[in-house]
C-alpha cells in the first residue's frame, strides 16, 4: 500500500484510510463480528489509518475499534472527532471543556492514551477560533493528541487556524460527485502543508461495485439527502451507469477507479471510504493507474456538477461552512 503523510508534521499513513461511521449502525444494522472482520480485511490490505468519531453510534464505533485493537495489537493511526451534540436540539460545542471531556471518553472507548489526530467535527462560529485552536494546542502539548484537524470548513478558516497553530488535516466530503473543495480548499491545504482527508469518496455507496436501489438508501441518513430522493436518485444512477460502463470496458473496479481519481488530485489527498463489510473493502483494490487521457475521459463522463440535488438536506447544512 502506498503511503502519504498526514500533514507536513504528521505521521506517514496508508494512502487510503477506512471511515468507520457505518460501524455505529448509521447505514443499517451491523454486528461487532462483522465490523472486526472488516478491520481484519483492512489490515490485510495494508490500510493503517482509521477514522471514527464520538457520535458514530454514540460511542459504538470507537468501542468496536477499541476492542479490535485490544485483541489484535497492531500499529494503526487513529483519528477521531468531537463537537457535535446530538440533542435535541442538535448543536455544535467547540468549548475547551467539551472537547477535553469528549476526548477523554473517546480515549477510554478506544483503549489508548492518545490519538494521532483529533478533529473538531464542525465549527461553531459563535466561539472564537483562537480559543478553540488554543484548546486543541493544549491537548497536543499534553500528549493526548498528535495534532488537530478541522472538518467541513472553508479555506479562510483553515488559514486563520493554521496561523494560530499548525493544522495536520482538513476533512471535507470530496468525490466525483462532490467537488466543492476544488474551489480553494484542496489548494490551500497543499500550500500550507495540510493533509486533505476526503470522506465519502465513493459517494455514500453510489460509486460502489453494485448499483444501489432506492429502497437501500432509506436509512434515515441518506433518505433525508436530496441526492437520494426522487427524481434526483434515478437521474444520478443513470449518470453513474455511464461511469460503470467506462470502468467495465477497462476491466477496472468502479470503487477502485473512483478512489484512484480522488488520489490523483494531489499527493496530500487521502480518501477514507467507509464500509462495515470485508467483501466491500476488498473491492477497493487494486487501484488502476490513471493516465491523463483516462482522467480526461472520466471528466467527460462525470463532469464537475453532474449530481442532481444537494449533498445534504437543509437541516444538515446549518453547521457546514459554505464559501461558494
Image (tube, helix red, strand yellow):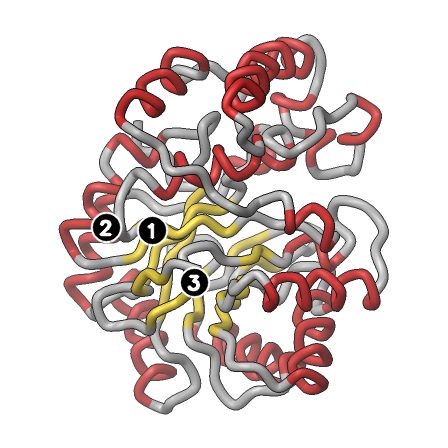
How many residues crowd mark 3 within 10 Å: few (<14), some (14–19), many (20+)? many
Is residue 201 shown to the viewer in this render? yes
Please identify, in this view, whether the residue under mark 1 or under mark 3 is nearer the observer. 3
- Taking the spot 55% from the left edge, 80% from the top edge, the residue there is 101
Q: Rounded to the nearest whole Å, what is the CA distance between mark 1 and mark 3?
A: 14 Å
Q: Quadrant of the C terminus?
A: top left
Find residue 85 and report its horizontal and vertical position in percent: 61, 59
The answer to whether mark 1 and mark 3 are in CB contact below 8 A is no
The answer to whether mark 2 and mark 3 are in CB contact below 8 A is no
Q: Which residue is mark 2?
A: 189
Residue 311 — which label? none
Q: Which residue is mark 1?
A: 196
Label 1, secondary structure: give it.
strand
Label 3, secondary structure: give it.
strand
- Taking the spot 15% from the left edge, 63% from the top edge, the residue there is 163
Q: Which residue is mark 3?
A: 14
Between discs 2 and 3, the one toward the N terminus = 3
Between discs 1 and 2, the one toward the N terminus = 2
User: Measured along the vertical axis of the image, is residue 160 above or below residue 173?
Assistant: below
Amino acid at each position: 500500500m502506498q503511503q502519504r503523510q498526514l500533514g507536513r508534521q504528521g505521521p506517514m499513513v496508508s494512502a487510503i484510510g477506512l471511515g468507520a461511521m457505518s460501524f455505529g449502525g448509521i447505514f443499517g444494522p451491523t454486528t461487532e463480528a462483522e465490523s472486526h472482520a472488516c478491520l481484519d480485511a483492512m489490515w490485510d490490505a495494508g490500510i493503517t489509518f482509521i477514522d471514527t468519531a464520538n457520535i458514530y453510534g454514540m460511542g459504538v464505533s470507537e468501542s468496536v475499534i477499541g476492542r479490535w485493537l485490544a485483541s489484535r495489537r497492531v500499529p494503526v493511526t487513529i483519528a477521531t472527532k468531537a463537537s457535535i451534540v446530538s440533542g435535541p436540539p442538535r448543536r455544535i460545542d467547540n468549548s475547551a471543556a467539551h472537547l477535553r471531556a469528549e476526548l477523554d471518553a473517546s480515549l477510554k472507548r478506544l483503549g489508548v492514551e492518545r490519538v494521532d489526530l483529533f478533529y473538531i467535527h464542525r465549527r461553531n462560529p459563535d466561539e472564537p477560533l483562537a480559543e478553540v485552536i488554543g484548546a486543541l494546542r493544549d491537548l497536543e502539548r499534553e500528549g493526548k493528541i498528535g495534532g488537530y484537524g478541522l472538518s467541513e470548513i472553508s479555506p479562510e478558516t483553515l488559514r486563520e487556524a493554521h496561523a494560530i497553530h499548525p493544522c495536520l488535516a482538513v476533512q471535507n466530503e470530496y468525490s466525483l460527485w462532490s467537488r466543492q473543495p476544488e474551489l480553494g480548499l484542496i489548494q490551500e491545504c497543499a500550500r500550507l502543508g495540510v493533509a486533505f482527508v476526503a470522506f465519502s469518496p465513493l459517494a455514500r455507496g453510489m460509486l460502489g461495485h453494485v448499483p444501489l436501489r432506492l429502497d437501500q438508501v432509506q436509512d434515515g441518513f441518506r433518505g433525508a439527502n436530496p441526492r437520494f430522493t426522487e427524481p434526483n436518485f434515478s437521474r444520478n444512477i443513470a449518470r453513474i451507469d455511464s461511469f460503470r460502463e467506462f470502468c467495465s470496458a477497462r476491466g477496472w473496479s468502479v470503487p477502485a477507479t473512483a478512489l484512484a481519481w480522488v488520489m490523483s488530485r494531489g499527493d496530500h489527498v487521502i480518501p477514507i471510504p467507509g464500509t462495515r463489510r470485508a467483501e466491500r473493502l476488498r473491492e477497493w483494490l487494486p487501484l488502476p493507474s490513471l493516465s491523463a487521457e483516462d482522467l480526461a475521459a472520466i471528466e467527460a463522463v462525470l463532469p464537475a456538477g453532474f449530481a442532481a440535488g444537494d449533498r445534504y438536506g437543509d437541516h444538515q447544512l446549518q453547521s457546514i461552512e459554505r464559501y461558494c
